[in-house]
């Protein structure tokens, strides 16, 4: 469901009662579960969801914290209840984002000679390190033009027919896992941007592939295997987030680090780094 700021009326369909219930159900909690977790009486939770009681600003923050609502959506809760948003959305080059961006750059640099990127919640690539840039250059200088979109978007790279898919040798195994991960994130993070990307890409997919992942439960980590220019590359990803973010942009950043899944891939990346020195 797409909700605009104009629709966030305190008493309307997308007002605070609707959003509270939507997120409670999204987290698969009963009213009693939410009451016990948040320290709020079940009766008051019921009154808030029915619109019989109006929340204070502190109550909104308390319940949204309990439900692990992303900061962008906590602002929407506040707006829906008639309060001003309190979490800012700063540009990455905002001086107050300096410490955060320095930390991101350090993490990306420290992961070299292996690829790493910083993504927002729609999987747009906001920053990348040199090994990742070398890797995407191997796919062709026009790779991002081929997959379309105004930004480098990882989902378009994976799932556009002119993207990385023809190079992936184990697509029936990893394709469904990546797609479902994106769906889960869009659902759990309230990501309307990601849902829009998924809706755009869904008609281009083979449903038989996306809903069949053979033998995926037989290994602890499913590597992403590619054959590019005669080279076999096998990697797996580890994702990190900022645990104490108080800014919407920082809250939505994901650091995705790629690790070699075999000795040949490790040697290839280390060799490429040595050649650059």
Image (cartoon, grey):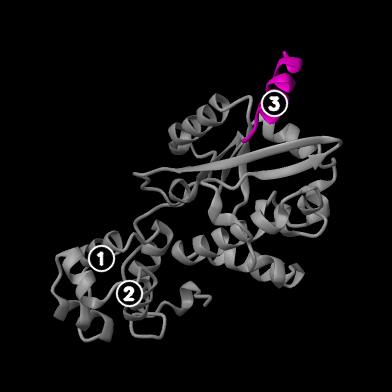
Q: CA distance from mark 3 to mark 1?
A: 46 Å
Q: Mark 2: few, some, or many residues within 10 Å (few <14, many ≥20)? A: many
Estimate how packed mark 1 is, as few (under 14), some (14 to 19) or many (20 or more) residues with alpha carbons within 10 Å: many
Main SS type for the magenta part? helix
Tell me if I can see residue 152 in this picture.
yes
Q: Is residue 163 left or right of residue 175?
A: right
* Residue 19 covered by magenta stretch: no
Q: Dot 2 corresponds to which residue?
A: 20
Whole-number angstrom distance, CA of label 3 to CA of label 2:
47 Å
Q: Are marks 2 and 1 in contact (CB under 8 Å)?
A: yes
Residue at the spot of label 1: 63
Where does residue 274 sit, x and y in percent of width and height? 71, 15
Q: Is residue 197 left or right of residue 189?
A: right
> Which region shows up in magenta?
261-277
Instruction: Tell me residue 197's x, y (percent).
Output: 65, 64
Q: What residue do we see at 20% from left, 64% from top?
A: 37
Picture quadrant where residue 100 is located: top left
* CA–CA distance in space, label 2 to label 1: 8 Å
């Amino acid at each position: 469901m797409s909700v605009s700021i104009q629709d966030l009326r305190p008493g309307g369909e997308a007002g605070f009662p609707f959003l509270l219930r939507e997120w409670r159900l999204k987290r698969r909690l009963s009213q009693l579960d939410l009451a016990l977790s948040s320290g709020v009486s079940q009766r008051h939770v019921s009154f808030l969801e029915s619109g019989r009681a109006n929340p204070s600003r502190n109550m909104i923050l308390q319940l949204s914290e309990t439900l692990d609502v992303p900061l962008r959506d906590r602002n929407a809760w506040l707006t829906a209840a008639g309060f001003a948003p309190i979490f800012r959305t700063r540009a990455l080059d905002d001086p107050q984002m300096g410490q955060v961006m320095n930390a991101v750059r350090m993490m990306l640099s420290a992961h070299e000679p292996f690829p790493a990127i910083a993504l927002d919640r729609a999987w747009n690539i906001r920053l990348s390190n040199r090994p990742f840039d070398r890797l995407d250059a191997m796919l062709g200088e026009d790779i991002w033009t081929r997959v379309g979109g105004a930004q480098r978007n990882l989902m378009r790279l994976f799932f556009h027919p002119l993207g990385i898919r023809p190079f992936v040798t184990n697509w029936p195994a990893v394709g469904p896992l990546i797609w479902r991960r994106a769906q889960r994130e869009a659902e759990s993070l309230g990501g309307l941007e990601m849902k829009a990307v998924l809706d755009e890409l869904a008609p281009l997919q083979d449903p038989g592939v996306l809903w069949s992942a053979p033998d995926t439960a037989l290994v602890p980590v499913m590597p992403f295997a590619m054959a590019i220019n005669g080279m076999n590359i096998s990697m797996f990803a580890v994702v990190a987030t900022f645990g104490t973010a108080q800014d919407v942009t920082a809250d939505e950043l994901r650091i995705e680090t790629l690790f070699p899944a075999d000795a040949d891939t490790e040697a290839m990346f280390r060799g490429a780094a040595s050649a650059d020195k």
